[in-house]
Image (cartoon, rainbow, N blue to C red):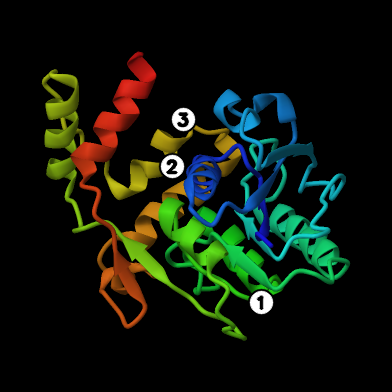
């Protein structure tokens, strides 16, 4: 009997890549994907016999259904409607926890978190991941795409909490990113630096101003002396991916231009 796996919210990029990997797996699991609007499920998924798109909203808890699933993947969402990120994270995690408690068949929760989520302060907008991790202490694996699919399909019994960090094949500098973008687009790029005290002003032009300080805090946490400065070292449970930055950007650029 094949595994039944639930992925939500399924519209995220990590959700899409995980679902794709699951549907391509030789294990042939049945995948339930929860969307606020199921019509947004990719056509290629809808046409697959092992795929089911259902309607649900983690913010309200309505429509969350883990019945019959042996494993679930939860990707904590952010909100841009003016609500406090901490309160939003608490409410959504509680909604998920309550539904988990009503799912007797469930054996594994894979929680897509973020680097730095182990810290309870000084990480800006990433505090929503810290709150979620604290409330949903079952099995927390921090990963993306293929690794998430492999973890969901793994039937080995490993009780307790397992935290895994997934990096790319190497760390990249700002210049590496600039050069990769130039290579992919064929256009000359410009590297612009922003002073620490101007980060919030910069983010206010890209996200609702209410959240600008939190996004600035996330960046500051990664700089030397920041809360997350030491989190980029390889550890015992660190896995390195194979996809180089330029290859990932090339694939993304192709999707946007085709």
Query: Where is mark 1, residue-wise?
Result: 137
Q: Quadrant of the N terminus?
A: bottom right
- Can you say whether 76 is above or below 253 in the image? below
Depth-wise, is mark 2 or mark 3 nearer the camera?
3
Which label was assigned to residue 206? 3
Residue 242 x %, y %: 24, 54
Q: Residue at x 49, y 59 (%)?
A: 148
Q: Are marks 1 and 3 in contact (CB under 8 Å)?
A: no
- Can you say whether 94 is above or below 237 in the image? above
Query: Where is mark 2, residue-wise?
Result: 200
Labels 1 and 3: the sequence-earlier one: 1
Q: Nearer the viewer, residue 175 or 56?
A: 56
Q: Quadrant of residue 153?
A: bottom right
User: Crowding at label 1, few (<14), some or many (≥20) Cα neighbours within 10 Å?
Assistant: some
Residue 103 lies left or right of residue 118; in this view the side is: right
Q: Quadrant of the C terminus?
A: top left
Under circle 3, the secondary element is loop
Q: Are marks 2 and 1 in contact (CB under 8 Å)?
A: no
Number of numbered discs on residues: 3
Residue 76 lies left or right of residue 224; in this view the side is: right
Depth-wise, is mark 2 or mark 1 nearer the camera?
1
Depth-wise, is mark 1 or mark 3 nearer the camera?
1
Under circle 1, the secondary element is loop
Q: Quadrant of residue 255?
A: top left
């Amino acid at each position: 009997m094949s595994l039944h796996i639930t992925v939500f919210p399924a519209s995220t990029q990590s959700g899409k890549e995980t679902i794709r990997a699951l549907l391509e797996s030789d294990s042939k699991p049945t995948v339930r994907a929860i969307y606020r609007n199921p019509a947004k499920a990719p056509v290629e998924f809808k046409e697959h016999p092992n795929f089911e798109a259902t309607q649900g909203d983690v913010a309200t808890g309505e429509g969350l259904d883990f019945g019959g699933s042996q494993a679930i993947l939860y990707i904590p969402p952010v909100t841009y409607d003016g609500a406090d990120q901490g309160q939003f994270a608490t409410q959504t995690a509680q909604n998920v926890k309550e539904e988990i408690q009503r799912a007797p068949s469930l054996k594994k929760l894979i929680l897509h978190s973020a680097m730095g989520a182990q810290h309870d302060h000084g990480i800006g907008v990433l505090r929503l991941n810290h709150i979620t991790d604290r409330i949903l202490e079952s099995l927390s694996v921090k990963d993306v795409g293929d690794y998430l699919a492999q973890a969901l399909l793994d039937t080995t019994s490993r009780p307790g909490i397992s935290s895994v960090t997934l990096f790319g094949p190497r760390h990249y500098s700002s210049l590496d990113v600039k050069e990769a973008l130039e290579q992919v687009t064929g256009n000359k790029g410009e590297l612009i630096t922003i002073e620490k005290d101007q980060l919030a002003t910069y983010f206010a032009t890209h996200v609702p101003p209410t959240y600008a300080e939190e996004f600035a805090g996330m960046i500051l946490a990664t700089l030397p002396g920041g809360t997350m400065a030491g989190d980029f070292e390889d550890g015992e449970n660190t896995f390195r991916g194979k996809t180089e930055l330029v290859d990932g950007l090339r694939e993304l650029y192709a999707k946007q231009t085709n």
